[in-house]
Amino acid sequence: MSEANVAAFPNGEEKIDETQDVEGVAGKRLKSFIERIERLEEEKTALAEDIKEVYGEAKAVGFDSKTMRTIVRLRKMDLEKRREADDLLEIYKSALGMA
Amino acid sequence: MSEANVAAFPNGEEKIDETQDVEGVAGKRLKSFIERIERLEEEKTALAEDIKEVYGEAKAVGFDSKTMRTIVRLRKMDLEKRREADDLLEIYKSALGMA
Amino acid sequence: MSEANVAAFPNGEEKIDETQDVEGVAGKRLKSFIERIERLEEEKTALAEDIKEVYGEAKAVGFDSKTMRTIVRLRKMDLEKRREADDLLEIYKSALGMA
Amino acid sequence: MSEANVAAFPNGEEKIDETQDVEGVAGKRLKSFIERIERLEEEKTALAEDIKEVYGEAKAVGFDSKTMRTIVRLRKMDLEKRREADDLLEIYKSALGMA
DNA sequence: ACCGTGGTTAGCTTTC
DNA sequence: GAAAGCTAACCACGGT
């Protein structure tokens, strides 16, 4: 690891928003990574809220959300199973030199 | 709860994608809700992957992801704290007729 | 909650093995719980090791452990899916007053 | 790796329990490995449930499970520390011809 | 309002 | 040393 980045400073409270000059370029870079992550996490949170809303709407017209969750889970499992099965097939193929 | 929507059918394997006529309009509606949810969850998953990638990139140039996660967590806490403080302020203001 | 048990004392290093008289009966009880848990966890760890050994044996006679793990996972998914489907059925039944 | 064992067959749903004759002895062997693993994993899962139950019991009489988990963790760490210290001692001893 | 359950995330272990 | 799978803690939701 490059030593330049080692000083990845947890800061006290107030300074955390400002890239400190003393840290130089590494600080800028880190800041940029952090902000990208935060942006993505905001979007993720927003989606989680959207999902909740959909369950809410469905409930409002009489569907049971527990049931719905179970269905969603089952369907996801199907999907994963299918994917895993494909993976297995790939493994076989490459084991048999058919890759 | 209205019984009309209860029968949200467990299907054997393959039929799960087709709304069955016997279920009528409720089935269609449920299907639509489920699909909206699934779409949103896919997006959410995609974002989670994006986030992981960013951590990966950062790691690749020498940042420690554990530290980064801590920073992100701290900043989120700050944000929430600030937001709560604002809420409190609003409450005070409206209590004092300053809203 | 009974106050008697509140003092469930994280101890410094050395005393942790002895039930302290000052804690009285609560300490004895806690100790007993802790020891039961530790016993169970030991067994669990032992099983994990056994499992690893089986994979090792299988590998030693030419089976690919990645493939095996996939198979095990797929079979477990089948099992779970079946269980979930049952759960769903239960939900329906109780929703229809057939419980 | 011997190719003989490669064909560890993805099966459609229902057939997975029957060793297929076409696979011959390798299939039987694989099946036996898989089943041993599954058996062990079941036991492991059962133990995990037992552990959860013990925490439940403890909680029911007023102990805080989070604290208990901390204690268990600490004691495990102690144990490992002690074991490592012993290992070290062994190393010294054998280095000094006192084994 | 609380409890129990389910989902998510982080850390650890193991594997390649 | 990186990548993945497993496990355990945490948190949030829904039901009672």
Image (cartoon, coloured by chain):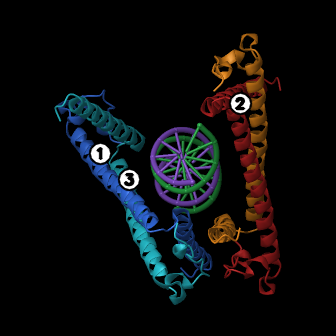
Chain colours: A orange, B red, C blue, D cyan, E purple, F green
Whether residue C58 is situated above or below residue B50 in the rendered picture: below
Label 2 chain ID? B
Of labels 3 and 2, the one closer to you: 2
- Give the alpha-carbon distance from disc 3 to disc 2, as whole Å: 46 Å
Q: Chain of mark 1?
A: C
- What is the distance, in whole Å, between disc 2 and disc 1 at their CAs? 45 Å
Numbered badge on residue B61: 2
Mark 3 falls within which chain? D
- Residue at 71 percent across and 67 percent down: it is A99
Q: Front-most of B70 and B50?
A: B50
Residue in the image at 33% along x and 40% along y: D76
The x and y percentages for residue A94 are 66, 67
Look at mark 1 in the image and give the residue it sits on.
Answer: C34
Quadrant including the N terminus of chain B: bottom right
Give the residue type at disc 2: Val
Marks 1 and 3: in contact by CB < 8 Å?
A: no
Residue D53 in sight here: no
* Circle 3: residue type: Gly
Amino acid type, mark 1: Ile
**Above or below — where is B58 with respect to D51?**
above
